[in-house]
Image (cartoon, rainbow, N blue to C red):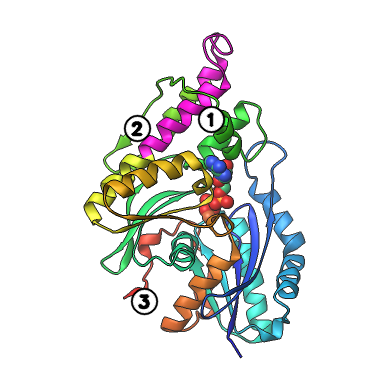
Amino acid sequence: MKKLCLGIESTAHTFSVGILDFEGNIYSLINDVFIPEEGGLHPGLVREQHLNNFMKIINRALSEAKISIKEIDLIAFSQSPGLGPVLKIGAWVARMLSQLVDIPIVGVNHCIAHVEIGRLKCNIKDPLSLYVSGGNTIVSAFESERYQIFGETLDLAIGNMIDSFSRDAGLSHPGGPKIEKLALESKNYIPLPYVVKGMDLSFSGLYTSAKYLLQSKDYCKKYNLNDIAYSLQETAFGMLTEVTERALAHTEKKEVLLTGGVAANKRLQSMIEYISKEHDARFEVVPLRYAGDNGAMIGWVGILRYKAEGGHSISGTIINPKERMDQITIPWRS
Ligand code: ATP
Ligand code: FE2
């Protein structure tokens, strides 16, 4: 009988359950995504949706994998980083299941999970990773026993910035795919703030300037929404590419991994692929089902940690909303 892990993702808008075996074969993955009617993510509303739906999602994942909860050998959950009230739901559900079935429990750092599922799914060994999502923008690689952060955003995350702009432009959530489509209709670049500080990025000035363009008297006269979408993408993705390339030159990694929800963007993919080729590095994009938030990636890191050092005690499963990926030991790669 293969050993099985049930992984629970609950850091932000997605409550997701993945079931996989200890070799990394995934048997089921069910997502429930909170979509705000207006504005950004309200932690209280997200928490309510997750609280209402978690048992349904777990049951659907078990039934798709054709197993009962008694056949699960390990529970993994996202312990950090994320929205406190939302992280607590996943932690609470995981503790309950672990005690109910009397099986070990492992807490997982969400950012590390994005990278590790990429290593598994793309069959890649030691990449430089660009992790771009609604809540994160991180360039990282494994060095000196840790996932070191070489560059990150100083303010807004790239996905959040694009979603906020598209909301201002009257588009529905999520804005990323809509902005990508509009950008394809333009080649008219409007200069916008390009802010790279050392190895870090800042998107707030870019966001404000793009928003002002929507309010300007020239809007719909000298330029249109397609032009702003194009300019916003070219500027933001240019910044991401610059930092990724510099980290690649510094680390001399021979693989580059693009992950997170924004990895779906074809223009970003082509820019990162270009610099990867320039540095003779293999380029991989995590398959979209596993690039966004998902319970399978949490389950996989739970398995890696459990195999290396066993499970966590219940007191070791307290959530940590601000924990960075470079604070975490990685015994399975040491
Ligand atoms: P995290 O918790 O890791 O920060 P998340 O909660 O934002 O992740 P993801 O599914 O990883 O969830 O990413 C969602 C983001 O991806 C949204 O900001 C969305 O607009 C963006 N996105 C999705 N598709 C595209 C695309 N084609 N181009 C640009 N952005 C995209
Ligand atoms: Fe994520």
Q: Nearer the viewer, residue 329 or 113?
A: 113
Q: Position of residue 176 (x, y in %)?
A: 57, 39
Query: What distance separates the C-alpha of mark 1 from that of mark 3?
Result: 44 Å
Q: Amino acid at mark 2?
A: Val
Mark 2 vs ligand 1: CB below 8 Å: no
Are the residues at dot 1 and dot 3 in contact (C-beta closer than 8 Å)? no
Q: Quadrant of residue 56?
A: bottom right
Q: Identify the residue at image location x=36%, y=71%.
A: 329
Q: Nearer the viewer, residue 241 or 77?
A: 241
Q: Which residues are magenta?
A: 212-239
Q: Nearer the viewer, residue 289 or 136?
A: 289
Residue, disc 2: 195
Residue, disc 1: 184
Q: Is residue 224 a member of the stretch shown in magenta?
A: yes
Indicate which disc residue 331 carries: 3
- Left or right, 44 with reference to 232: right
- Left or right, 47 with reference to 162: right
- Left or right, 87 with reference to 110: right
Q: Identify the residue at image location x=51%, y=43%.
A: 265
Regarding mark 1 in the picture, which secondary structure is present there?
Answer: loop
Observer-side mark, 1 or 2, equals: 1
Regarding mark 3 in the picture, which secondary structure is present there?
Answer: helix
Q: Is residue 6 above or below residue 243?
A: below
Q: Identify the residue at image location x=47%, y=39%.
A: 267
Q: Identify the residue at image location x=47%, y=29%.
A: 232
Mainly helix, strand or loop, the magenta region? helix
Quadrant where the image shows the C terminus:
bottom left
Q: Is residue 102 above or below residue 265?
A: below
Are the residues at dot 1 and dot 2 in contact (C-beta closer than 8 Å)? no
Precedes in sequence: disc 1 or disc 3: 1
Q: Position of residue 318 (x, y in %)?
A: 53, 69
Query: What distance separates the C-alpha of mark 3 from that of mark 2?
Result: 36 Å
